[in-house]
Image (cartoon, rainbow, N blue to C red):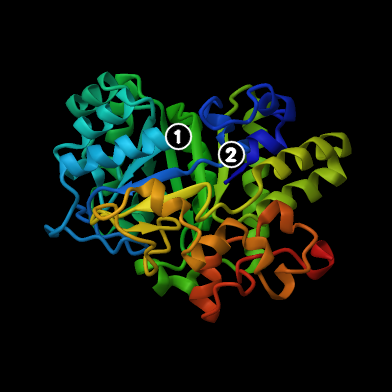
Amino acid sequence: MIGISKLYCGTVEPSDALRYGRQSGELPSHLLQFSSDKRPVVVWNITRRCNLKCIHCYAQAKDASFENELSTDEGKLLIDDLADYGAPVLLFSGGEPMVRPDLPELAEYAVKKGMRAVISTNGTLITAEKARILKEIGLSYVGISLDGMEDVHDRFRAVKGAYKKALEGIRNSQAAGIKVGLRFTINKHNVHEIPNIFNLLEEMDIPRVCFYHLVYSGRGSQMVKEDLSHTESRKAVDLIMDRTKTLHDKGKAKEVLTVDNHADGPYVYLRLLKENPERAAEVLDLLKMNEGNNSGRGIGCVSWDGEVYADQFWRHYSFGNIRRRPFSEIWTDLSEPLMKKLKEKKKYVSGRCAACRWLDICAGNFRVRAEAVSGDVWAPDPACYLTDEEIA
């Protein structure tokens, strides 16, 4: 996760993170990526069921009931363990988390245990009444996925009317006083919609947006050829930086982040090195604190059936099941070979990654994407768009 607004527009300075001691339990949410202890933000896919049919869904969700989902009581035991372990954030995802009737109960339980509870949703099921309930239980944030404007979004979601219902969910959340952000997964078929997403941020006064680089997982694994070329990725990140700066200069600053491609960090730094060398030096300090990709370390995933993964995309390799062992034990068990290597992945990456000058900042980028293309989990990430000259 690369904070474009934080880095490029200077809304965060290195001292901001340092004054909290950089412990995840003490940091405000907008500084969590700079924590030193890297307690995992945990994505809990609480269901595989979804009312939409998104073509890039990593969970391969369907509008059907699935057996073996964790019960409410099992979910509370998971939350007890995560809270005791010190995981700062529990992100409820799916499928579509709003289809589970006990979502408010589980989120409220997490809040009472001292965690920050957030949800990742398609937004279509957030009625005014459900938004009011989510606000009352102390939900910190709602991330609503949009793939573009109406025609593009509804095509990606494979359900007509999904866009209008998502916007209704945004308005209901705002009216209830819940912080709302957008989630946008970039690919060849919607990259042209990035300006429209920025327009929507301004028009609807939405404070945050995350632009996700495509990860080849689940149904998204069929979209490898739909990912941007390296040149297109650079243009997209430049556009995101330009539009973020424009809003910032207009006094309408938004929190803008890119996710799932840590080449973005060095790319921002190299651009600032030309434009503002003094700020570039501060950005380099922040990037060192960020430490790049944190799959298996600073982010983890628990599936609907209790399986534990390195992140929400790496669903073909489980480290264990919370029905048999607590998450905290699974997460810290270095006798598991892949878990041990992920905790120090910079030692194991190969090819151009191993010799890259940005390895300490990027941490080898996204391993699951490398594995999807090459079959080798330690091969270079094919989505890294930095040139050989830039990494030398």
Q: Residue at x 42, y 29 (%)?
A: 204
Give the x, y percent position of residue 228.
57, 66
Q: Residue at x 21, y 24 (%)?
A: 133
Would you say residue 141 is visible in this rendering?
no
Q: Earlier in the sequence, mark 2 or mark 1?
A: 2
Residue under label 1, please give it: 86
Return the residue nearer the eye: 91 or 20. Answer: 20
Residue under label 2, please give it: 37
Return the residue nearer the eye: 364 or 196. Answer: 364
Quadrant for residue 167, please give it: top left
Say whether marks 2 and 1 touch (CB < 8 Å).
Answer: yes
Give the x, y percent position of residue 206.
45, 30
Which residue is farthest front? Answer: 335
Q: Residue at x 55, y 30 (%)?
A: 30
Q: Residue at x 40, y 50 (%)?
A: 329
**From mark 2 to mark 1, how far is it between C-alphas?**
10 Å
Give the x, y percent position of residue 310.
45, 58
Left or right of 233 on screen, residue 311: left
